[in-house]
Image: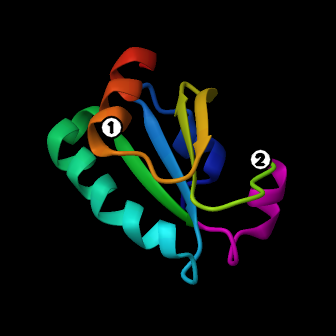
Amino acid sequence: MSTFGDIIADENPVLIDFYADWCGPCKTLAPILKEVKTELGENIKIIKIDVDKNQQLAAKYQVRGVPTMMLFKNGAQLWRQSGVIQKQDIINIIKSKA
């Protein structure tokens, strides 16, 4: 099984979505992220992390609110933002950062 460190060390960009099942905005973001994945395909990995089940990881990255998205490449954090963001904005951020 891959560790979080292994996942974010990828040379392709990795978008991490910290979410919670009880979070309304997280449910809004989920289909948006599916569209981002459909559009970018193999150029992006999108990983969803449930903050309730991964409290240590959420604490390590100081996730205070959900949804919080972070973009990593080669283990480095390139971008971070909380809240719902529209598909094209997410795609533009990924393309500009990665």
- Dot 1 amino acid type: Ile
The part of the image, by quadrant, that contains residue 50 is: bottom right
Residue 54 position (above or below residue 75): below
Q: Which structural element holds mark 1?
A: loop
Residue shown at the point (39%, 16%) measured from the top left: 96
Foreground: 24 or 19? 24
54 in magenta: yes
Residue 97 position (above or below residue 93): above
Measured as percent of width and height from the top left, residue 18 is found at 59, 59
Residue shown at the point (33%, 54%) measured from the top left: 33
Measured as percent of width and height from the top left, residue 43 is found at 27, 32
In the picture of the structure, the residue carrying the numbered disc 1 is: 44
- Range of the magenta residues? 50-61
34 in magenta: no
Asked if disc 2 and disc 1 are in contact, CB closer than 8 Å, the reply is no
The part of the image, by quadrant, that contains residue 9 is: top right
Q: Which structural element holds mark 2?
A: loop
Measured as percent of width and height from the top left, residue 62 is found at 81, 49
In the picture of the structure, the residue carrying the numbered disc 2 is: 61
Q: How crowded is mark 1: few (under 14 residues within 10 Å), some or many (20 or more)?
A: many
Foreground: 4 or 58? 58
